[in-house]
Amino acid sequence: MRHVATLPIVVCVVLLAGCATPEVKEPSRTRILDPDQEDDTGGTFLESSDVRTIAQQMTSGLLSTPAIAGHGETARIALAPVRNSTRFLIDSDIFLTRLRIELNRVSEGRVRFFMQDHAQQVRRQILREGDQTGWEAAADEIAGHVLQSVRRSDRPGPVRMAVGSVKNTNITGMNAESFLALLRARLAEQSGGRVVFVSEPVSQRAQQALANRAATTDLGVDYLLGGEFIAQSIQVAEGKKEVELRLKQKTEVFGQTYTKENTDEETLKFEARQNPNVTKWFNCQVVNGADGTIFCEKMVSLEARVASGLSAADFILTGEIRALSKSSQGAYKSDYVIVSFQLVDPRSNEVLWEDAYESKRASQVGTVYR
């Protein structure tokens, strides 16, 4: 009787298992498509073929516009981001990237673009290392100027020179004493015995005597070698100020771009303090030890400000993506998309050329009844 009672339950389980739809697993596969080929994925936004068509159409229009065709020499173009005002989340830079590639391909050198954002950190490092190797040339230039002034003086015999101090008002991280030591070595090498340096204690006493407006001739010192590092900036504390940070998607500090993911606020502040992106000069002064007057003076550039080069841009190329989107209560959707580009004069802010690409697509989302 117990087996008879359980029989209906077993039958129900078997029937339910027979009615269940078996899960069909299709093997993964990849199709290689031409960039202009439709992928049958659907959607109402632009396809890859549209991006390529946009680039070709805009390239033809840009190169034939009087602003470019009549420029006479290579036109330098700066790129401004394409603004996406549609409901679609896309990489809007793909349009400018494809357009830039097409222009470089067919313009035959009539247009040139600036490298913006990408590879700027490496470029900055290359330029700064080049500046640092030029410090020896700067020391040679100063030494030659000082020796020329010494040779024109009427002082008999070797000139005794003391090493003074170096001022550094607003460049953090600059090794001032090392540069002065390099300059002293260059002077001694090139003078051929015309300039000799006194010992460090004598230099310190001569510097103190000059600071107290006392004559230093009793110490046997003719001149005091010193100078000052200068950052060419209208802000006095450019190298030491705290940078106000508004950490959005990207933050730029002295020409270098940082992101939220790999940089915190303290790192940015440290970078700004230690390595301000300004032109750095050294002003060398040779002071007369007898009366404190400046015997000779020479200013040389040590590091140039790393500029983006955008100041040389003749034009700005930018664009915008807008869309008119509609959907019904059912499964119907449509999007009218317009991608426009503008060529702008950076000085007058006038739009010199504009063109657009239009597309409209409608789709119906299928409904599955179970």
Image (spheres, rainbow, N blue to C red):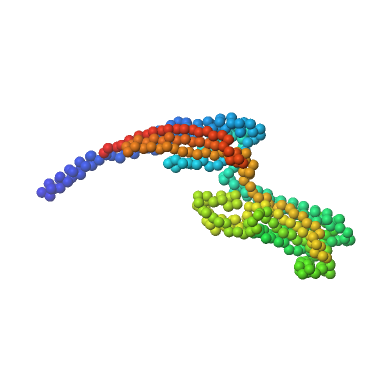
The structure residue drawn at horizontal position 83% and vertical position 56%, both measured from the top left corner, is: 149
Residue 357 drawn above or below residue 304: above
The structure residue drawn at horizontal position 88% and vertical position 59%, both measured from the top left corner, is: 154
Q: Nearer the viewer, residue 34 or 120?
A: 120
* Residue 291 found in image quarter: bottom right
Q: Quadrant of the C terminus?
A: top left
Q: Nearer the viewer, residue 40 or 168?
A: 168
Q: Which residue is farthest left?
A: 1
Q: Horizontally, is 106 left or right of 284 in the view? A: left
- The count of marks equals 0
The structure residue drawn at horizontal position 83% and vertical position 63%, both measured from the top left corner, is: 222
Residue 186: tell me if it is visible. Answer: no
Q: Horizontally, is 12 left or right of 48 in the view? A: left
Q: Position of residue 305 (x, y in %)?
A: 65, 50
The structure residue drawn at horizontal position 72% and vertical position 59%, both measured from the top left corner, is: 228
* Residue 78 found in image quarter: top right
Q: Position of residue 204 (x, y in %)?
A: 76, 68
Q: Position of residue 1 (x, y in %)?
A: 10, 49
* Residue 86 found in image quarter: top left
Residue 211: tell me if it is visible. Answer: yes
Q: Position of residue 332 (x, y in %)?
A: 35, 35
